[in-house]
Image: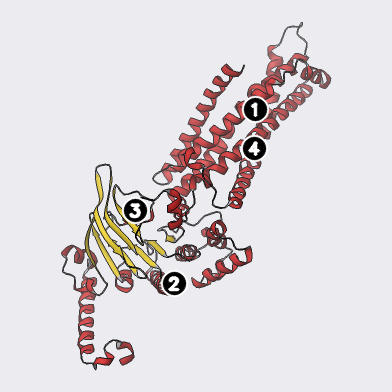
Amino acid sequence: MLKGMFSRPENGKMYWKEFMHQCSEIGIGSLGIVLIISLFLGAVTTVQTAYQLVSPIIPRSTIAQIVRDTMILEMAPTMVCIVLGGVIGSKIASELGNMRVSEQIDALEIMGINTKAYLIGPKILGALVTIPCLVVIAAFLGIWGGKMAGYLSGILSKEQYMQGLRQSFNGYNVFFALAKAYTYSFIISSIPAYYGYYVQGGALEIGRASTRAVVISCILILFADYILAAILL
Amino acid sequence: MIKLENIRKSFGEKVVLQDVTAEMEAGKTNLIIGASGSGKTVLMKCMVGLVKPDSGRVLYNGQDFTAMNDKEKKGIRQEIGMLFQGSALFDSMTVEQNVMFPLDMFSMGNYKEKQKRVAECLDRVNLSDAAKKFPAEISGGMKKRVGIARAIVLNPKYLFCDEPNSGLDPQTSLVIDKLISELTKEFNITTVINTHDMNTVMESGDHIIYMYQGLKQWEGTNKEIVFAKDERLNDFIFASEFLRDAKEMRQMEMFQDQNWRSKLPANKKEDPGTGA
């Protein structure tokens, strides 16, 4: 499928239009859910870390440090991408599946359009551009959510939290998070595209393909999470 | 002209097409008829390249379509228009955008020129008023007409129609048949229609191929089909008593017509319409 995607576009403008459309669908369309998830992930991480850090010799600012690294290393890329795998994955698989079943893909083929390049290419590229941006936004929001949760529940002051955030920051963690984000973006877009593009049958099969695509994407994300951690850390 | 040579296709153990050899006559309405499962849709898909035959060749004006690479196929495909059974319109686009899509993808003209061409095509299928509607907002017959407009927008040489009358009432079916026949003559297109609608067979069939269990069972015109001796064909075409009666009436009409024509002076025999 991926090999078939690489060909000279029939009309660059149309491909660009489709790419921008996918960026909007994937990026802007998922912004709401990313906002909510990341805020609560940060907040919950702060509260639960404080609950576990009972030793009086550990400064409170350590909570912020833990929240920051957890959000950057794991929560923002992996948790957010698992949720996006469900949201974007099911959308891509059902959209392509419906196009296949209703012969829209055949209609494009008859017109002489490379359907893999026109339908799948912009989706994968759109995901590769927008999902890492969403992950960065999620990391910031999660850290901010943690700060607000810590302050509102009286666990630690805003100053303590900011002090903790600046302690022993490692820039490599950001690189690691982005490496994860790009890998997951590819998984989230290509696996559902494959299942949707090659669906056979009717509405029932579209549902099945969509479910299978999401399940496999999630498993592959977790698998890739471990592999990347083992290689890069 | 489209020529099929020994087309063979099977899916697993099931042989769907068995050495089908036929010619689709240029500038005419060619019909492929047959019962469900007789292989007519697979045959059409082999012709347009959606299904690759196991063996055999599809020739477009002598060029072997089956042996072409994707790049070469693109050239032929841009000369093909196809109307699908379910119309296959793009749900997210309006009627106008659906018809404009092939122009956007392949035509170099500016937006105004494209819009003018789309308006011409929609006008030709009597759908000028529905340009801004979405496929979900129009009827089945209108969808078929949009499908036809989209198929002809790039002035194709070949028009393929897969079951153009399926799911339509008899009156709308007639409109679609008439439209396809008119377009075939108007633009000198080689049209191939997959159907089991008897009205289409009798009214539009310049050249008919009858498929039976993956084999080409009979070939002829809509005039010859009335007198065909093939038992399977007769069982398929004139399945009901009503159709058998209609067949006899048509035979009588044609017989009387021939007698009447034979009485005309020699110089009037060619054109009975003006001689009456």
Secondary structure under badge 2? Answer: loop
Query: What's the chain of the residue with tag 3?
Result: B
Tell me where residue B224 appears, x and y as whole percent.
22, 73
Task: Give the residue type at disc 2.
Answer: Phe
Question: Could you tell whether B255 is left or right of A216 in the image?
Answer: left
Asked which quadrant contains residue B129, the reply is bottom right
Marks 3 and 4 close (CB-CB < 8 Å): no
- Front-lying residue, A109 or B71: B71
- Location of mark 1 (residue): A178
Q: Earlier in the sequence, mark 2 or mark 3?
A: 3
- Location of mark 4 (residue): A130
Task: Give the residue type at disc 4.
Answer: Thr
Task: Give the residue type at disc 3.
Answer: Cys
Q: Which residue lies at the image location 64% right of the left edge and 23% below the top edge?
A: A176
Do the residues at pointers 3 and 4 share their chain? Answer: no
Secondary structure under badge 1? Answer: helix
The nearer-to-camera label among 2 and 1 is 2
Task: Give the residue type at disc 1.
Answer: Leu
- Location of mark 3 (residue): B46
Do the residues at pointers 2 and 1 share their chain? Answer: no
Cα–Cα gap, marks 3 and 1: 46 Å
Secondary structure under badge 3? Answer: helix
